[in-house]
Image (cartoon, rainbow, N blue to C red):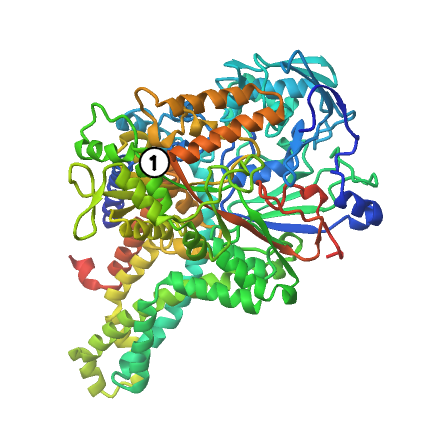
């Protein structure tokens, strides 16, 4: 963590220290200026509005056009100054005072001041605007209060100390009050800055601004001449003249167009495409990077919802198994995660024993690596009163054969095969597992509305650098506590997890916060309410001539430092 | 004139029926445009519920339908939840792009298939005829998705054609003639793929219809009178065979907007296909209904054109 208390004055230059900065100083910024970078989006962005955007395509484009007060370096996951050049924390972590850089200007040339910051947070916090990010600004049950101190200083007051600290400010793009105040007052801000908005009506503090949009086909962004960030040699950023986003809906087509030279970067490559492209990468002038385990989580869970009043008697009967810790532990021990890695991801994934992946700085390194232990699984089941008949089928204490249906989203190239391998592992344990592949919306309906399912293999994409945004999964009353959204009394371990999560949320000592969260991971690994399976590695590619490329496991893997990217030879 | 008016009336009834059915069927399937957000731990259920209220997804079906009708009457054609924008403008531009592709492909397929079909009918049983039939059987069996992926792989590896999209990045800097060449280069792959999948159907219809006409007594009689073979084929047999072909042409026009969805997705053609696919997956109902309705308009148009053509080529319809 960068800061405990007191003033943290950081260098005025935003370029992270280390290799890129040294490189920049050596070559000089001017030599790197120019050129165009072409990237792909899986779908057309749906909006330019940072307040309401939720889809990956919109967020990717908005990131290039906007800036936050504090920015998390996607590679080392540390907080760095962005629009705020410094900040101080006092009142026991309840008051943050941020000082903006001098001379900030939006991409239309209009000055950016503390008024814009206050306006932005007013918008994010307004219940009527319904920003999906609003909940992140509720601390200690109260909305954060924002106040302008002077033109360059803003004060944030929190109802309680917040463990996330200044990282909170990453993810809230500062909005231009002069362009959006009218829509806000008219109550139409949520639908402002739609995809058809003319470029002149958009402005941000990011490295690029919109120049042209061809519906369904592409967006052309140009350098923002008023961008605030400079490289280590003092040359203005970004280096690139243009950033182009092409809409390429099909993942295989993205890989092929990258190979053909029509795209300069390729994100989220499948293991198959990655291996194929790697074969002649040098000849084609491509650089393929395996950035290591990512933050995507694939997991299995059993339905433990309280089904009182629902006409699902057979499921209620099966829940007697699902609620036994030994049963869940046995299922976890029976799964050959190495096979999932080998077969589903051609070796380019990492087996998991915790819901935190090795890509996260929050993984409890003391947890043992996962290993398949069929004998251990049998011992656990035997201990819980299960037995095997002559045919090898598992039966519970009452003599009922053990079998259930595994729900999976149809058409998913990864989770489908994963379910089949798990089915085979559990068959060896005498369990009769059937697979139900349903369309995503039907799966969501069962998970969140009807609760009519036994078990589910699910994936959550793009985790966060901090555990807090995902707390709704682990908290017993969390909105994403998939396995038990409705429940009666809690088990002691569930109460302990709730307590630990809330304690770490308010803990300002990073070491202590880590200890609290490590304990959460130990309990979850012991109780297995969710059985973590595997996380794929982040596989990306770029032209070898692209300088300063620093692929990260956090989204956006390739373009998070787009302002620093440059072409080694002028193209 | 009355004939055309009656047909148009049918068309409107059809469109109303299609819109009601689309709403009903969408209502029966689980989930709505806000459901997918439910899976994102960073979005609270409150925000999802608020979105439902904002777009009226929580209202009963008849209320939603009437709202949508009003929006259609105002030219908006509904409201997209995903884009937070009216559906009409989203559709028009893409429908235009789809038409450019589909009309080119249809023209290609018909221009090649009609002469090839007539030629094959005149040489029934010859090795060329059999080869043509075998080739068209193979094309019928291979889905256009496979053809598109094949084309994409070839384009990416050889670099002979652009591997997707509709225009080069420097399109705006090009002159008029160069722009046309650029569009043609981008059109080539998707249009050929689409034409290849339409070609065998047209070929087989033309061949069968002309073969049947060649057997008919009046053609036999004409042959007896010593009318040259070419004239016999093109001036007598083909017009006599036109009736089933006109119906087929009507069907082709009806499928102009909806036939290229898969090819557009694979080859990143900025038409209705990618938009429709996204909208279906995201349950963006008004976009889906809008696209279905546009396709239905083409169905009506296609049938109308076919009926009018039939009226023109077939004296029996006029007499009826």
User: Who is closer to the viewer here, A514 or A188?
Assistant: A514
Residue B89 image offset from top left, x and y in percent = 47, 39
Quadrant where the N terminus of chain A sits is top right
Residue A531 image offset from top left, x and y in percent = 39, 39
Indicate left or right for B300 with A342 as reference. Answer: left
Residue A540 image offset from top left, x and y in percent = 58, 52
Quadrant where the C terminus of chain A sits is bottom right
Indicate left or right for B230 with A3 as reference. Answer: left
User: Who is closer to the viewer here, A519 or B319?
Assistant: A519
User: Who is closer to the viewer here, A325 or B307?
Assistant: A325
Indicate left or right for A496 with A431 as reference. Answer: right
Q: In the displayed structure, would residue A50 be above or below residue A413? A: above
Q: In the displayed structure, would residue A432 be above or below residue B182? A: above
Which residue occupies 47% across, 33% down?
A522
Query: Which chain is mark 1 on?
Result: A
Which residue occupies 39% across, 60% down?
B145
Which residue occupies 45% across, 33% down?
B40
Residue A339 image offset from top left, x and y in percent = 41, 54
Q: In the displayed structure, would residue B227 be above or below residue B146? A: below
Q: Is residue B231 visible?
A: no
Which residue occupies 25% across, 85% down?
B125
Please give the count of numbered marks on the rendered protein: 1
Disc 1 target residue: A444
Q: Is residue B256 visible?
A: yes
Element class at badge 1: helix
Q: Crowding at label 1, few (<14), some or many (≥20) Cα neighbours within 10 Å? A: many
């Amino acid at each position: 963590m960068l800061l405990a208390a007191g003033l943290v004055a950081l260098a005025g230059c935003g370029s992270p220290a280390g290799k890129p900065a040294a490189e920049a100083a050596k070559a000089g910024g001017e030599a790197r200026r120019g050129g165009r970078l072409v990237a792909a989006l899986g779908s057309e962005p749906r909006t330019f509005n940072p307040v309401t955007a939720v889809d990956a395509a919109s967020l990717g484009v908005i990131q290039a056009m906007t800036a936050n007060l504090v920015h998390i370096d996607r590679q080392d996951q540390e907080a760095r100054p962005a629009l705020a050049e410094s900040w101080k924390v006092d009142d026991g972590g309840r008051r943050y005072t941020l000082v903006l850089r001098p001379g900030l200007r939006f991409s239309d040339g209009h000055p950016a001041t503390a008024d814009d910051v206050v306006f932005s947070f007013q918008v994010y916090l307004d219940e009527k605007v319904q920003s999906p990010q609003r909940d992140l600004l509720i601390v200690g049950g109260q909305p954060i209060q924002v106040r302008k101190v002077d033109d360059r200083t803003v004060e944030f007051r929190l109802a309680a100390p917040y463990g996330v600290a200044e990282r909170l400010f990453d993810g809230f793009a500062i909005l231009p009050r002069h362009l959006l105040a009218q829509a806000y007052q008219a109550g139409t801000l949520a639908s402002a800055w739609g995809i058809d908005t003319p470029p002149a009506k958009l402005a941000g503090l990011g490295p690029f601004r919109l120049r042209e949009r061809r519906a369904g086909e592409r967006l052309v962004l140009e350098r923002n001449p008023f961008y605030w960030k400079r490289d280590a040699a003092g040359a203005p950023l970004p280096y690139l003249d243009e950033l182009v986003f092409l809409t390429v809906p099909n993942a295989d087509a993205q890989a092929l167009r990258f190979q053909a030279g029509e795209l300069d970067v390729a994100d989220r490559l499948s293991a198959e495409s990655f291996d194929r492209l790697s074969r002649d990468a040098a000849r084609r002038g491509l650089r393929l990077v395996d950035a290591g385990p990512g933050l995507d989580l694939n997991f299995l869970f059993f339905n433990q919802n309280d089904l009182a009043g629902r006409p699902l008697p057979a499921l209620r009967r099966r829940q007697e198994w699902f609620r036994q810790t030994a049963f869940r532990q046995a299922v976890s021990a029976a799964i050959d995660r190495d096979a999932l890695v080998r077969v589903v991801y051609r070796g380019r994934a990492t087996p998991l024993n915790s819901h935190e992946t090795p890509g996260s700085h929050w993984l409890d390194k003391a947890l043992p690596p996962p290993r398949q232990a069929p004998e251990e699984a049998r011992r656990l089941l035997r201990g819980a009163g299960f037995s095997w008949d002559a045919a090898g089928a598992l039966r519970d204490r009452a003599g009922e054969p053990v079998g259930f249906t595994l729900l999976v989203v149809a058409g998913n190239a990864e989770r489908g095969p994963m379910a089949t391998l798990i089915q085979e592992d559990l068959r060896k344990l005498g369990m009769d597992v059937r697979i139900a592949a349903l369309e995503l919306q039907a799966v969501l309906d069962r998970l969140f509305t009807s609760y009519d399912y036994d078990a589910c293999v699910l994936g959550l994409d793009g985790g966060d650098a901090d555990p807090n945004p995902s707390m709704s999964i682990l908290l017993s009353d969390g909105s994403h506590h998939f396995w038990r959204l409705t429940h009666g009394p809690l088990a002691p371990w569930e109460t302990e997890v709730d307590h630990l999560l809330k304690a770490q949320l308010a803990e300002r000592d990073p070491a202590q916060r880590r200890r609290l969260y490590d304990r959460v991971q130990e309990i979850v690994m012991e109780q297995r309410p969710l059985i973590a399976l595997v996380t794929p590695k982040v596989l990306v590619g770029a032209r070898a001539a692209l300088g300063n490329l620093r692929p990260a496991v956090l989204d956006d893997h390739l373009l998070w430092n787009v302002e620093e990217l440059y072409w080694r030879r002028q193209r | 004139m009355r004939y055309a008016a009656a047909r148009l009336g049918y068309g409107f009834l059809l469109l109303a029926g299609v819109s009601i059915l689309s709403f009903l069927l969408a209502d029966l399937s689980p989930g709505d445009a806000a459901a997918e957000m439910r899976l994102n731990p960073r979005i609270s259920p409150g925000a999802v519920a608020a979105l439902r209220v904002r777009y009226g997804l929580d209202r009963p079906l008849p209320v939603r339908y009437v709202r949508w009708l009003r929006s259609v009457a105002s030219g908006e054609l509904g409201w997209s939840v995903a884009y937070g924008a009216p559906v009409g403008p989203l559709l028009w531009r893409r429908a235009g792009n789809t038409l450019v592709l589909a009309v080119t492909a249809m023209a290609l397929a018909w221009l090649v298939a009609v002469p090839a079909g007539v030629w094959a009918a005149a040489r029934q049983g010859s090795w060329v005829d059999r080869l043509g039939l075998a080739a068209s059987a193979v094309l019928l069996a291979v889905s256009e998705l496979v053809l598109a992926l094949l084309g994409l792989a070839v384009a990416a590896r050889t670099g002979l054609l652009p591997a997707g999209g509709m225009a080069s990045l420097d399109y705006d800097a090009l002159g008029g003639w160069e722009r046309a060449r650029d569009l043609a280069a981008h059109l080539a792959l998707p249009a050929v793929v689409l034409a290849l999948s339409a070609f065998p159907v047209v070929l087989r219809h033309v061949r069968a219809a002309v073969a049947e006409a060649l057997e008919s007594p009046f053609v036999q009689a004409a042959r007896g009178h010593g009318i040259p073979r070419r004239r016999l084929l093109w001036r007598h047999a083909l017009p006599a065979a036109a009736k089933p072909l006109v119906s087929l042409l009507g069907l082709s026009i009806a499928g102009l907007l909806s036939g290229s969805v898969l090819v557009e997705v694979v080859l990143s053609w900025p038409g209705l296909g990618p938009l429709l696919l996204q909208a279906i997956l995201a349950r963006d109902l008004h976009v889906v209904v809008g696209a279905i309705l546009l396709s239905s308009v083409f169905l009506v148009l296609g049938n109308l054109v076919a009926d009018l053509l039939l009226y023109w080529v077939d004296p029996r319809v006029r007499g009826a």
